[in-house]
Amino acid sequence: MSIPDQTSAAEQAARQRIQACYELDGDAGRLARYYRAWASDYDLDVSREGYCGPKIVAELAGAMQTAYLGRERAAISILDAGCGTGLVGVQLERLGFRLIDGFDLSETMAKKARRTCVYRHVRGDVNLNGPLSDYPNASYDITVSCGVFTQGHVRPDGLRELARVTRPSGFVIASTRKIYAEATAFEDEVRHLQDAGVFALEHCLKDGILIKEDRAHYWIFRMTHCACMPIEERR
Ligand SMILES: C[S@@+](CC[C@H](N)C(=O)[O-])C[C@H]1O[C@@H](n2cnc3c(N)ncnc32)[C@H](O)[C@@H]1O
């Protein structure tokens, strides 16, 4: 096989692995097995496909800190929900953030994130389709999530838990694959949390690049001053 053939075969395999992850069904065991098998190829696969979600999410966090939070970046605490191998953490660290925690459903992906050495603490086996029991209310200035609100992964109501762990006047920044936002009740969930006075939609970058041939919406939610979730709204 010539070198161009090998390259295109590798690109095709990467594309297939990316595509197959959207065909999962939200089952925690299946997701964890899929990502355990993909962990070693993940970074190369997504970089071949021009994945720029982590850079966009980190830069939005940087912009919110500069525009609104007032304190220096190194003192802003950030939770990276569904951190995977740590691509978002690496971008956040590049921008000067230092207090970065992460969690992921897959312990194998979480292990790779720990090896980046940019996180304070990374937990594996944490499922955002349920309560984040180890994370107290209002414990982070900014919560970010990239590539997680997507088909077969996390349901829209995962947003409630991200809001719950974020401080009043802090930010939740999340990407949704465009087709996920259109096919699920994500926007209903946003409206519900806005109507309940939990957060306000600060901005949404619509149809931004996610990977080469795929688009995402990038959402920025600003927690209200007294962002408190009515108890019956929690999971
Ligand atoms: C496409 S990857 C994105 C990883 C990383 N945020 C990035 O941008 O490279 C999706 C990640 O979400 C994690 N994930 C999927 N379902 C999850 C769930 N229910 N709770 C927590 N993490 C989940 C997967 O294990 C995987 O690491």
Image: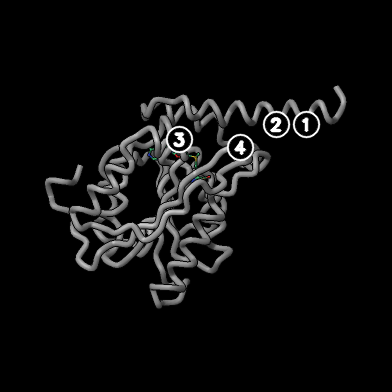
For the residues bearing labels 2 and 1, Cβ distance under 8 angstroms: yes
Which residue reaches farthest right?
A: 2
CA gap, disc 2 to disc 1? Answer: 6 Å
Instruction: Tell me which numbered mark, 4 or 2, is placed earlier along the sequence.
Output: 2
For the residues bearing labels 3 and 1, Cβ distance under 8 angstroms: no
Q: Which amino acid does label 1 sit on?
A: Thr
Q: Which mark is residue 7?
A: 1
CA gap, disc 3 to disc 1? Answer: 29 Å
CA gap, disc 2 to disc 3? Answer: 23 Å
At label 1, counting other C-alpha atoms closer than 10 Å, the crowd grade (few under 14, some 14-19, many 20 or more) is: few
Rendering quadrant holding ligand 1: top left
- According to the image, label 3 marks what residue? 179
Instruction: Tell me which numbered mark, 2 or 3, is placed earlier along the sequence.
Output: 2
Instruction: Tell me which numbered mark, 3 or 4, is placed earlier along the sequence.
Output: 3
Q: What residue type is labelled 4?
A: Glu
- According to the image, label 4 marks what residue? 213
CA gap, disc 4 to disc 2? Answer: 13 Å
